[in-house]
């Protein structure tokens, strides 16, 4: 009764949250409400959630938004954006100090600190960004049912140790609009990263598919040829050079898991102190003991992958006005950049 084809991904295990599925209704299909038809094909989906998604525009039939009572017909082409392996973990409200950059009735923009997981999951049931958001929303509306806290509000993610801007939707309609912008690659996202090595070109583009590492399943790798992995494009430009490391800006055209980390490693410039991809050891520099001590001091100042989501721009889902946000570099990254700048200023980094 169903011809299904997965037709692409929206955004990034931790980042890629939605998948785009296309269905073609079989010739022998009897008239059936679209919400019921979808429920029969989505494991664990409730009728109410499906109806909310349809009302918010997550589903189209033959390119048009329909109502939940629409009855499918043979030959209908149905496009559905849905959560990939949606988490069923309860989001327990927890009081925490969130750095809320902007908030209105539709969206929240938060500057995420390091060492914070975005959403609850295996091994991280508490202390996540969503735990804090849940508490914040309950303060605004004490009558809100905790079980119905809007998981759909999370339309993209950033890694645990990446800092910077993330947008969340407070309504299903806002989530649908933002999700489409991410899927269509119209969201403006710029990251700042400290990477190993002197990046030769002032600017460039990395075009390489990304897929899970064949040997280490928690890691990802770049595959420039063939059909392995998902299409991914990163544009980069050099902000400042410190001979052994470079400060770069990365602009995401796509949003794959660990995209910047994998792409920069792929061109020989692993992110500074990115332990998962080998950046937590000296990859460029001298053999002198003083230099090793200097690098160890840098690792101590910024004890994480040196990556920050600095710029976020999108169209507001209700007003349709352009929104633009900038988050200054966090203290740990600014501190290690300043230290490298001083080091480099002393005769090419021969002494601190």
Image (cartoon, grey):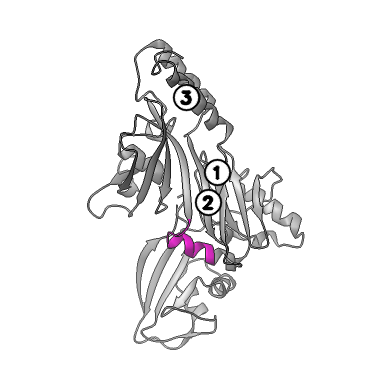
Residue 257 in sight in this render = no
Instruction: Identify which residue is drawn at 52% across, 47% down.
Output: 311
Residue 182 in the magenta stretch? The answer is yes
Q: Nearer the viewer, mark 2 or mark 1?
A: 2
**Residue labelled with disc 2:** 312
Q: Earlier in the sequence, mark 3 or mark 2?
A: 2
Picture coordinates of residue 184, whole percent (x, y): 43, 63
Mark 2 in CB contact with mark 1 (< 8 angstroms): yes
Q: CA distance from mark 3 to mark 2?
A: 27 Å
Of helix, strand and loop, which one carries label 3? helix
Mark 3 in CB contact with mark 2 (< 8 angstroms): no
Mark 1 in CB contact with mark 3 (< 8 angstroms): no
Magenta residues span 177-187
Of helix, strand and loop, which one carries label 2? strand
* Residue 307 higher or lower than 167, as above or below: above
Picture coordinates of residue 22, whole percent (x, y): 38, 72
Residue 38 in the magenta stretch? The answer is no
Instruction: Identify which residue is drawn at 47% across, 78% down.
Output: 37
Sort mark 3 into few (<14), some (14-19) or many (20+) by Cα contacts within 10 Å: some
**Residue labelled with disc 1:** 164
Q: CA distance from mark 2 to mark 1?
A: 9 Å
* Residue 78 higher or lower than 255, as above or below: below
Residue sitting nearer the eye, 223 or 342 = 342
Please give the count of numbered marks on the rendered protein: 3
On residue 204, the disc is none
Residue sitting nearer the eye, 178 or 249 = 249
On residue 341, the disc is 3
Q: CA distance from mark 1 to mark 3?
A: 22 Å
């Amino acid at each position: 009764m169903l011809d299904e084809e997965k037709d692409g991904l929206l955004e990034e295990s931790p980042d890629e949250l939605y998948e785009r599925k296309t269905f073609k209704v079989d010739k022998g299909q009897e008239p059936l409400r679209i919400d019921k038809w979808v429920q029969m094909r989505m494991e664990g989906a409730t009728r109410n959630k499906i109806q909310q998604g349809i009302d918010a525009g997550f589903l189209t039939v033959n390119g048009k938004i329909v109502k939940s009572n629409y009855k499918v017909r043979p030959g209908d082409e149905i496009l559905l954006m849905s959560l990939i392996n949606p988490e069923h973990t309860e989001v327990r409200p927890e009081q925490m100090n969130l750095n809320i950059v902007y908030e209105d009735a539709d969206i929240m923009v938060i500057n995420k600190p390091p060492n914070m997981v975005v959403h609850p999951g295996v091994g991280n049931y508490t202390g996540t960004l969503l735990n804090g958001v849940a508490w914040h929303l309950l303060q605004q509306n004490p009558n809100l049912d905790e079980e119905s806290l809007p998981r759909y509000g999370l339309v993209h993610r950033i890694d645990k140790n990446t800092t910077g801007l993330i947008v969340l939707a407070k309504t299903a309609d806002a989530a649908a609009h933002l999700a489409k912008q991410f899927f269509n690659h119209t969201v403006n996202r710029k990251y700042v990263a400290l990477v190993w090595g002197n990046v030769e070109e002032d600017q460039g583009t990395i075009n390489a598919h990304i897929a899970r590492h064949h040997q280490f399943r928690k890691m990802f790798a770049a595959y420039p040829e063939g059909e392995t992995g998902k299409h991914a494009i990163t544009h980069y430009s050099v902000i400042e050079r410190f001979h052994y490391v470079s400060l770069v800006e990365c602009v995401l055209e796509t949003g794959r898991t660990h995209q910047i980390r994998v792409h920069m490693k792929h061109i020989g410039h692993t992110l500074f102190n990115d332990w998962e991809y080998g950046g937590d050891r000296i990859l460029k520099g001298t053999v002198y003991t003083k230099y090793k001590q200097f690098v160890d001091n840098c690792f101590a100042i910024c004890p994480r992958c040196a990556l920050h989501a600095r710029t976020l721009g999108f169209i507001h889902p209700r007003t349709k006005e352009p929104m633009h946000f900038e988050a200054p570099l966090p203290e740990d990254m600014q501190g290690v950049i300043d230290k490298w700048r001083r080091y480099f200023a002393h005769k090419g980094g021969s002494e601190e």
